Image (cartoon, grey):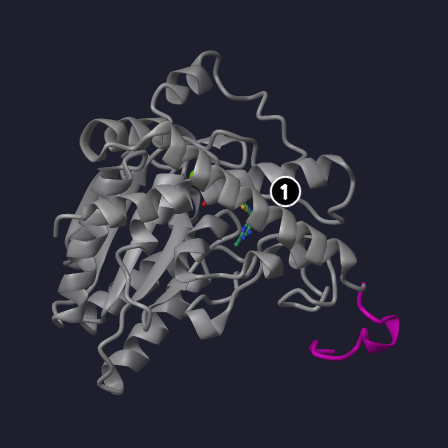
Amino acid sequence: MALSREQHFDMYYYLLLGRALEERLETLYKQGKIPGTIYQGRGQEACYVGSAYALEPGDVIAPTHRDMIAMLPRGMDIKLILAQHLAKATGPTKGRGEDNFLGDLSRGIFTTVSMLPDFYPVAAGAALAFKIQGENRVALAYCGEGATSRGDWHEALNFAAVKTLPAVFFVINNQFAFSTPVEKEMKTGSVANRASAYGMPGITVDGNDPVEVFEAVKKSVDLAREGKGPSLIEAKTLRMKGHTGHDPFTYAPSGLIEQWEEKDPIIRFEALLRDEWQLTDGEKLQIEKEIQLKIEAAVAFAEASPLPDPNEVTKDVYL
Ligand SMILES: Cc1ncc(C[n+]2csc(CCOP(=O)(O)OP(=O)(O)O)c2C)c(N)n1
Ligand SMILES: [Mg+2]
């Protein structure tokens, strides 16, 4: 499916929104306004926007700690994201959770859980429910390459394949699991080639190219919707920041970040928009302004929101 000019601009908007939102969260974190931490997906924006953009409103996503940007094309309210990070009562977990461990079921976004990759079996379960109920919906699960070494990852893929479920398994291979480099995580260096072990298609894509990601995910989503079962997609990229806000990423080999900065997904996509879709400086400025206003309104909302009432600490939690 060829993307229109409007769709290219839409994707560009979400790429810029994702990056600006994470930069704003980083500033708040450094100002000591975020009681927990931040997990950043800088450099991985194309993975999130390209994949989420290939879904329909009735579909569901199951993101991890790093995948907040994938929620944006699904219409996640950034006021809720800000309120969650500031641990305010107006956030999705009413101040009981922190960071990116949030979601919005009304937008098909499962709430992120910490245990990795628990949302793989959950996504397979959702896909099973869609199939049993005859609903034309697809479940897309995210995780990093590190999480693919866990047993539940393999169980989810095998189960989804055996049951021919409408699921897409999207792995972001960002070369690190916390401080462990990918060569110490697996022997093969590739996640996608495991797909044949489950009897499903497996493909590796350039995780810094939103159009390539979109096309691969769209193909897999279409297969899933046609009743042809799940697929595995591996997007290769680099996590441009440390694991969390407190990690300065000093273990990155010298020159690696600079090398990947040249492949920055936003700069590359912007060049494409200028060359092929006549993006002008004025249009770019307009989008950036709109994003800035939206983010500042969300920051103001979160800052003005109350902290949770201590008397309600035992409400909405399992004791
Ligand atoms: C079962 C489990 N073990 C350990 C952790 C702690 N932990 C959180 S993130 C992380 C690294 C994950 O790496 P990867 O899957 O590559 O995702 P990335 O952070 O690179 O996006 C670890 C070990 C966890 N959350 N769950
Ligand atoms: Mg990783």
Which quadrant of the figure has residue 206?
top left
Q: Quadrant of the C terminus?
A: bottom right
Q: How crowded is mark 1: few (under 14 residues within 10 Å), some or many (20 or more)?
A: many
Give how far across and how far down residue 209 sits, in percent: 27, 35
Query: Can you name the residue that lies furthest to the top here?
Result: 254
Query: Can you name the residue that lies furthest to the bottom here?
Result: 133
Picture residue at 48% right of the left edge, 29% below the top: 240
Residue 220 vs residue 275, the one in the foreground: 275
Which residue was labeled with disc 1?
25
Residue 241 vs residue 299, the one in the foreground: 299
Residue 264 vs residue 314, the one in the foreground: 264
227 with respect to 19 (left or right): left
Q: Work out whether residue 191 can be spotted.
A: no
Picture residue at 44% right of the left edge, 63% below the top: 119
Q: In this view, does 309 lie above or below 292?
A: below
Q: Work out whether residue 166 can be spotted.
A: yes
303 with respect to 61 (left or right): right
The number of callouts visible is 1
Which quadrant of the figure has residue 287?
top left
Location of ligand 2 given as a quarter of the image: top left
Query: Can you name the residue that lies furthest to the front here?
Result: 282
- Name the chief secondary structure element in magenta: loop
Query: Can you name the residue that lies furthest to the right here?
Result: 311
Picture residue at 70% right of the left edge, 76% below the top: 317
Give how far across and how far down residue 195 sits, in percent: 20, 51
258 with respect to 88 (left or right): left
**Amino acid type indicated by mark 1:** Leu
- Callout 1: helix, strand or loop? helix
Give the residues drawn in magenta, as a range: 307-319
Picture residue at 61% right of the left edge, 61% below the top: 80
The question of residue 32 being in magenta is answered with no
